[in-house]
Image (tube, rainbow, N blue to C red):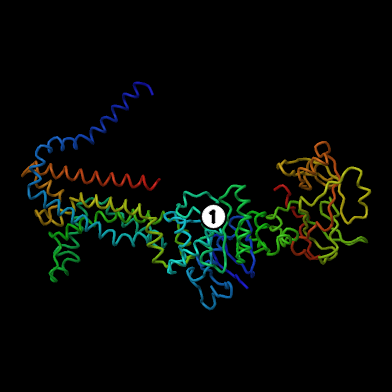
Amino acid sequence: MNQVRLLKHLPRTTLDLDFTFGQETIALFGPSGAGKSLTLQAIAGLLRPDSGRIVINGTLLYDGEQNVALPPQARRIGYVMQDFALFPHLSVAENIVFGLDGLPRREQQARLAEMVSLLRLEGLEGRRPRQLSGGQQQRVALARALIIRPSLLLLDEPFAALDTPMRARLRRELLTVQRQLQLPTILVTHDLAEAHMLAERIAVLDEGRLLQIGAPAEVLRRPAALNVARFTGARNIFLGRLQRDESGWQMISRRATLPLRLPSEGSVYHDGILAQCMVRPEHITLVRPGEEPRRAGRRETLLQGTIVEELDHGLSHSLFFHLDNAGGTGPEHVDLEVELSHRSYELLGVVQRRQWTLAIKEEDVHLIGPAIPPHFEGPAPQPLPSILE
Amino acid sequence: MSRRALAIWGLLLGTVLLFFALPLLAIGWRGAGGFGAALRDPTVFAALRLSLVTSLVSTGLSILVGTPLGWVLATKPFRGRALLETFIELPIVLPPAVAGIGLLMAFGRRGLLGQWLAPLGLEIVFTPAAVVLAQSFVAAPLYIRAAISAFRAVDPRWPQVAATLGASPWRIFWQITLPLAGPGLFGGVLLCWARALGEFGATIMVAGSFAGRTQTMPLAIYASLERDLNVALALALLLIALTFLLLLLLRLLTRLEHA
């Protein structure tokens, strides 16, 4: 088991984290300035925390109370920095074996050969870093970090310096290498797709704090805080009161655009409580005209709305709806954002039709964070996070 | 560009070039004839040897002291660092005469430090050691300043990565930091050496001008001016050639660095 507990006061932020992980990949996800890279530096021993405890693979690396702080040299942590930080004056081979100083030459060569074939660097051994493509540089950096047989791998934005097609290929390659080596990994990224694809769990950071850590699907579907929902691309966030009727729980939004049916399982609700919930734009369905009667009895909310704005992303479309029964907002006000694949967009004929019935399944409505207790009577309608901010 | 503007710019450029080139050309023109004969004058050889030895010793001392100092100033933040850096740069802009009198007051027979050294039999003033002292005083700051910027230009992530790969601070310095700062440091060495080679004002005050003992090339030029103009010109030509070579080397080096 690996443990990272850190407290570090810095001029601009305070780093305050506590999480444990096993033989898995954790993605540190969050906006820039959230403290992701600083966390890696602290784990690697390049930044000394004020207090806390770091245990990797059973070895105590840092303990503020016991006054233990191993230097980076003694930690055996493979660190691939942003932009790779290859030694520019050394060849590819010299870069890779740098961490093997002191081992017999034959052993060095054997391990070099192993890394060269693992990361497909054949024929590049004599080159200088500046003669390599971005992808090759990344693989050399990875080889250099892996050759010391680390007990933990740290990757700081490993794909940020690469172009999109290269990125997709190298992500797959990294996955393969990871599976072969079975190495616990902490990956820093601000790309949600990357976190989703490479990590078993996502840790969402904001201003030096851990907002949530969990499986990617869980973080996406059940954000523990408003900012988690925001960072992970949630758009439709509502504030309202929970209410029970004969068919189950509903949320009555202050803007009266809904009652939204809430999932009947998985959450504990209290009558009259104030809460925030969110619906991901890709979870809202456009109902074909005339199909509404057939949907009766489904556990979903049906809403009527008009498209007031749309964005074409190429492979998908963002549709911005004004809901018909939205209370107190002008006809152009955007109440709901819907994301649709380009294929569905064409099949449904969205170009010709502006008025739609929208369906939101109850399991796609997620309460954000802890509910606000019923005695809370805030100053009347709180400003809602605008869906277009 | 109009023809008139062209003419004005051309005239300006020509004047400037002439202003700098004329003295050099004049030395060549007047000195070429007697150059061969003048080289055989014992003063020339003695001054050349002394200049090379003292300037190399001064440069060597500057490297020895300035390299670790530059590294610390570049990489370790501490209170008063900016002040210290400014203080170290002061001798670069200080008039050599001020440096000379300062060194006399410190190392002279009745100087701050000299009065304690004299009873021990350590006399610095008017010895070759004083030449080295004067040269180091004015030239070392050039090297230290170059070393600071050379070390500062080394991305701190390189030594950091090296540390995570198990390299000791000592190995990191020799194998990562020093090679990467190398071109910048070497540039500093050349500047420092050129400055030491040309030192005149402070040297004449602290070391005097004794042929074969403290008379470096610039001092020998000044001394031979009245005795034998040809010797002075020959020395001047040698100095021009030496410094030109140094400058050329520096230029090639910076080009190499940018490539």
| The C terminus of chain B lies in quadrant | top left
* Disc 1 secondary structure class: helix
Instruction: Name which residue lies at 9% across and 46% down.
Output: B224
Question: Where does the N terminus of chain B fall, quadrant-wise?
Answer: top left
**For residue A362, what is the image quadrant?**
bottom right
A313 relative to B120 in the view: left or right: right
Relative to B41, say whether A182 is above or below. Answer: below
Q: Chain of mark 1?
A: A
Q: Residue furthest left?
A: B227
| Residue topped by disc 1 | A138
Residue furthest bottom in the image? A66
* Residue sitting nearer the eye, A339 or A198: A198
Q: Which residue is more in the foreground, B118 or A311? A: A311
- Side of B21 relative to A243 (left or right): left
| B9 is higher (above) or lower (below) than A131 | above
Percent from the top left, x then y, of residue A140? 51, 56
Mark 1 Cα shell of 10 Å, populated few (<14), some (14-19), many (≥20): many
The residue sitting at 11% across, 57% down in the picture is B213
Above or below for A51 versus A37: below
